[in-house]
Image (cartoon, rainbow, N blue to C red):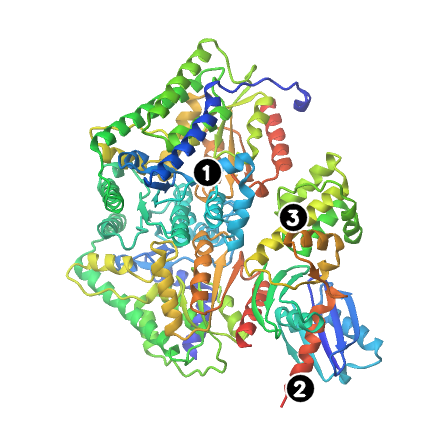
Amino acid sequence: MYLGIDTGASATKAVIVDRRGEIASQAIVPSGVNFKVSSEMAAKKALDAVRLDLEDMLYVVSTGYGKALVNSTSKSSEIACISRGVYRLIPSARTIIDVGGQDSKAIRISKDGKVLNFVMNDKCAAGTGRFLEIMSNTLQRPIEELSMLHFKAKKPVKMSSTCTVFAESEVVSQMSQGIKIEDVIAGLHEAIAERIYTMASRIGFEQDVAFTGGVSKNKGFVDALRKKICLSPVLPEEPQIVCAFGAALLAMKKHKEKP
Amino acid sequence: MKLNSRKKKRSRVLQTTRKIGELIVNYFSKAWDVKTQDKPVAWITVFTPVELLYALDVYPIAPEHFGALCSARGTILDYLKEAEKEGYSQDLCSYSRCCLGYALSGLNGPMPAPDMLVTFRNACDVYVKWWQSLHIHLGTPMFIGEAPYVLTYDDLNNYVLDYVVKQLEQLIELTQNKFGVKLDMEKLVNAVNLSDKASELWLQTLKLRRVRPCPLGGRDSASDIFPLVVMQGTEEAVEFYDELLAEVRDRVKRKEGVIEKEEFRLMFDGIWLWHAFDIIKYFEDKGAVFVHEPYSEAWAFRLDSSKPLESIARKVLSMGLNTDIDLRMEKFADTIEDYHIDGAILFSNRSCKSWSAPQLVTAETLNNQLNIPYLMFEGDMADPRQYSEAQVKGRIDAFMEMLSES
Amino acid sequence: MQIQRKMREFSRDPTSLLRRHNDGEAKVVGYMCSGIPEEIIIAAGLQPYRISNIGEHTSSLTPSFICPFASAVLENILRLEDLFQGFIVAHTCDPMWRIFDILKKKVNKPLFFLRVPHNTKNELSFDFMRMEFRRLKMFLERNFVTEINNNSLQSAIELCNHTRDLLRNIYLLNRNNEYKVKASDYFSLVLASAWMSKQEFNALVEASEFGSGKGQGNIRLHVNGTAIYDLNLITVIEDSGGFVVSDDLCTGSRYFWDNVEPSQDPLSALTSRYLTRTPCPAQNPLDDRLRYLSDMVASFNARGVITYAEKFCDPILYDFVHIRNKLASDGIPSLLVDYESPTQEINRIRNRVEAFIETLGD
């Protein structure tokens, strides 16, 4: 069995695959402030589910911001892990859009799964999950609720600003003008989708397009992004663990390559 | 008394200002006439000597003006996004992003494709990077001139002036060779005279804003500069400023101001927010009128047709942002006295780093030495996404409350 | 190696060197740009010292959207003003230009603004630049009661040329698919040369040996950008398995690559050197810069290019579009990494650099 651990900005994910590369178990825990702790927790949770110990793992690959702190056989970038995970789950995918808590990425892969090109967000937080978190705080509603409210929107507001700071005051002002929360939410989702679309356009879209990362669980956002890119995206069943799954697959590959 | 409970005051825009729309339409349709006649069109930055181009039979178009126009009309976003898709960062000047987006999306719009790109580095260094980028995307021949920073007025007579004059000669030669035209001296003298005349009229008009109540406000001055920006050296510009001066004189005679009851006289430091033009009205509704803007004055320069090139070179050199900060501050001090200014609004413009970078020092001077209260707010002149209306209006409210209590 | 360790210490705390200059009663003149002719300062008997953004404390006197490098440099000048006798600011980009405005209002030391022509190829630029160099010479003579003559200029030129030769020879060790000098060691050497007296630096380097290192990997990279003082930006590449073999940084080859040609008129020789040196992102024509970059990449066998950009840095952010396109046509992948404070954002930077290097290794 092989273990992949993805230490993301907001959640740490662990996936165990068997020798055929099928998912045997998975776990998601909040990252908190200590990646070492959260990665151990996530690994334990995934291991417990299949009643195994860390010693049973033939190879462990860690990825994500905290990867250096994780006890693993080797480390790899998220770009490589996401690409590998998607290639296995959706072999037809040529473009991947991954929106995580702190970073968003667009990756182009070849038909044999090789990374051709990638682009990541610039310093601004506007096109990432962080933006939604801040807005969810401002609106004092959990993100899950906001995600569903999106579909009730009749007239999504046009957010004039995608700067996180400006958007925050804009949201407050719209709410104070009595604009419906669902219309504000839909407007926010459109604004992020727009930002990501612009970034991804730099490497271009080729069908099929896969959406991954924690923010892809947000149905409202996915709806906005789908409309923006005018292509039907393919979503893995559990988009948040794709990167950890890819790490586990890499672990398998590396183990087999080992002399 | 609470300000927001006050009744909105009536404010008036000048009749002459309303003609600007038509002038702009004519200006662009003429550009297309020129283009269809196979005559050359040059894209220029706004402090480039248009008199020279008119005398060379080259029609000048200023993409900066186009950016402002798109922003005011709400059509800028598509262009901005087009440039951002190519990889131009949102942190770059929005005028340049608009123009690059326009160039990258097939030049479909009011600006015909350029046959030549001309700029003088004076207001900012962005001009150089922007023009280089256009040159690479469009493959159009380019002339980048440079006007060194004027450190003392001596520079308007020494080797610095020489350097600019010689560059103007290079520009003439390049244009002549490129398009097989000849500089028409008579035309040049005529254009210089017309440009000087328009400047004179505009400066006279601006001077009348010293009067209480102020006869010409920010909504007027922001539009009225247009003929001086790109149509210097034309009859139309002179006609416009003639008419404007007459109307403003008439207002002065009738003691008619921009707003009914003028309570505060303000200065605006920066480029206007073209997409949020209504903030001028927002001030006017609170009894405040803009009586001076360095931006409005920047376009006027007196020329001497007996020495056309030297005179044009001095103009290229001494545009506001290209003169030493002490010289700029001296001017500030005079203005504040002459125009009876109560407060200053400083627009910290993300797109114009050249203007905004030393603005906090400007503010200090205003506050500490000249005793003028100021409000500074951040935003972007043309990109509506980088501006928070709610935030800015909140600050304006607080500032006006402060002014009315002092 | 002892010298590397010493240089690293300097690059962590250059102020200690500045204090040492002061203790030795050297008169220190601060400057920021690799386009400032240090030779003229040295010929005046003064110690040139390159002011960095180390500490990365941005000044409260600039708006939030101004290049954080320029802002931190401003802060360092204001903080360390007492240790300098004067400052020279070059007109390269908008923020540097405007920092001069702010300094004019804020410092009490002699201050000089060098108007560098942006057009390096225009025949008029030479005369103008020579006049500006002459004005600089007069400024130094007047403010520091000294005389700069052809002899003192010639010997300053020889001294600086010697420093350049030493640096260039070490740099070339990494050519031809070899990797004998670790880039982070190397860049700390370049930085030290801009902080120490050239005599001391030359002697130290001459007494040391370089080129014993042996690289393991084969991912050779070129780094593009402006001034990099935080060497974590280089070590992050090394840690990710990349080898920086060439650069066009203001704190790298742009500073020393070109020598001053011997001439009867040293001021003219200096003018030619600084006008035609390694292309600077703020200057024109851009075609020269793109060609230079592409040639550099080819001659050092680099497989990819990392462009580091201070957030809000206009020259690099415009250029990147063209650099990326030009390199793509050469078949060379490139990566843009922007940042405000390398120290605080090192993980975000590492994340991107690692992914890029991994793609190259595939």
Camera sees residue B117: yes
Q: Residue at x 39, y 47 (%)?
A: B125
CA gap, disc 3 and disc 1:
29 Å
Q: Amino acid at mark 2?
A: Lys
Parent chain of label 3: A
Above/below status of B351 relative to B241:
below
Let me know if marks 2 and 1 both belong to one chain.
no
- Return the residue nearer the eye: B62 or C190: B62
Q: Residue at x 47, y 63 (%)?
A: C307
Secondary element under disc 2, as helix, strand or loop, is: helix
User: How far from the left and from the top, in percent, is residue B123?
Assistant: 39, 41
Let me know if marks 3 and 1 both belong to one chain.
no
Q: Which mark is residue A191?
A: 3
Residue at mark 1: B110
Closer to viewer: mark 3 or mark 1:
1
Question: Which quadrant is the C terminus of chain A positioned in?
Answer: bottom right
Secondary element under disc 3, as helix, strand or loop, is: helix
User: How far from the left and from the top, in percent, is residue C167?
Assistant: 34, 72
Q: Amino acid at mark 3?
A: Ala
Parent chain of label 2: A
- Return the residue nearer the eye: C86 or C226: C226
Residue at mark 2: A256
Dot placed on the residue nearer the N-terminal end, 2 or 3? 3
User: How far from the left and from the top, in percent, is residue B275?
Assistant: 55, 35
CA gap, disc 2 and disc 1:
63 Å
Above/below status of B86 relative to A8:
above
Q: Amino acid at mark 1?
A: Pro
Question: Which quadrant is the N terminus of chain A positioned in?
Answer: bottom right
